Image: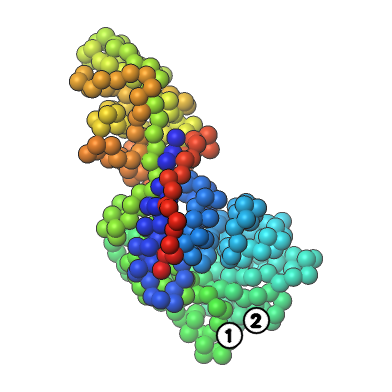
Amino acid sequence: MAEVDLAAILHNAREIRRRLGPRVALMGVVKANAYGHGAVAVARLLKEAGIEWLGVATAEEGAELREAGVTGPILVLGPSNREEMHLALTQSLDLTLVDEMGWHHLLEVCQNLSRPARVHLKVDTGMGRVGVAPDSVVSEWAPRLSAGVVRWQGLMSHLAESDAEDSSFTRHQLGTFLDVIEGLRQAKQALPPELHLANSAAALKYPGTHFTLVRVGIGLYGTEPWAPAFGLRPAMRLISRVTMVKRVKSGQSIGYGRTYVASRPTVIATVAVGYADGFPRSASNVGWMLLRGRRCPVVGRVSMDQTTIAVPDDVPVQPGDAVTLMGREGGEEIGARDWAAWSNTISYEVLTRIGPRVPRRYLGAGTPGPVD
Ligand SMILES: *Cc1c(COP(=O)(O)O)cnc(C)c1O
């Protein structure tokens, strides 16, 4: 079971808000099921707390929020095809425009539905994935977007390295973005109401990247290694339970591939979690769990639905006992970043892989006051 601490998410939103100027709006990024925390619950919480914008990856994700009654501006952060644009328009979602083909699709869809889309033009300042060339904005894009067929709502770009020690590439991208804005001013082109560049790390580290809006995902969930330095707390706790306990003899192997062989009599507990729940198979013989506040190593292969741990001799254990897979217990803590280390990845991937069959339970935030 995943326990999502809504109070922690609100706390993190406040910590981030505290570092923004009074006129900078906040976008809570709730794509990929709010990084595994539950998109509808997190979106409702953020709206209730007065967070101005929500960000999703696809029109489909945005539509899910609308169907749950979530109001206010929602930006689809990724590129959309014709069908997705159609859905976005009918659900009043803002769209990200990244290229020429997208522009033609957009015109078609606006015409078919007889309504203007709200559009954010994405400029590629160095991420290198999607977005229009910086030198095409003034000459090609601004005239089109200002002609009244669509509503030009935003100019945006995305940073490739804002979490790195070295700030030089972030400064380079910021410089390019500023040049585009300056070019529009000099050409006496109207600027769209929203200018946005920052993700979580930039929102916390580089005030110069804030412009009118910052797009914050991982910061809300509090799991990256830099989070504690900014007072952010992890919001997710994962617990499971012991299903069986046995004492095995020296020489007995455990699990698929027999990758673990007990070197002495050992208490083995089987835990009801596996890689189908998002517990990484690469934690086999490497990861650990907490039982009664004590670290217990994962022994043998993690399988789809079950994992085995070795329990220290002095720790009493029986079927039904709770096991902490992620979170704090006693003086010990296992974070998403520990899971990430076992799998050579980042906490983003760990969180978004928590499987759909893991029930999410929400610890209330009380009545959230506004995050301001
Ligand atoms: C996912 C995403 C974000 C959020 O990034 P974090 O590092 O999680 O804060 C911001 N902007 C865009 C365009 C994104 O796709």
Say if mark 1 contacts mark 2, CB within 8 Å. yes
The relative height of residue 204 versus residue 344 in the rendered view (above or below) is below
Q: Nearer the viewer, residue 34 or 350?
A: 34
- What distance separates the C-alpha of mark 1 from that of mark 2? 8 Å
**x, y percent for residue 123:** 53, 70
Residue of label 2: 146
* Residue in the image at 35% along x and 60% along y: 163
| Ligand 1 closer than 8 Å to label 1 CB | no
Quarter placement of the C terminus: bottom left
What kind of element bears circle 1? loop
Q: Classify 10 Å Cα crowding around label 1: few (below 14), some (14-19), many (20 and above).
A: few
Residue of label 1: 190
Q: Which mark is residue 204?
A: none
- Residue furthest to the left in view is 314
**x, y percent for residue 271:** 39, 24
Q: Nearer the viewer, residue 309 or 321?
A: 321
Earlier sequence position, callout 1 versus callout 2: 2
| Ligand 1 closer than 8 Å to label 2 CB | no
Q: How many marks?
A: 2
Tell me which amino acid carries mark 2. Ser
The reply, left or right, for residue 148 in relation to residue 62 is: right
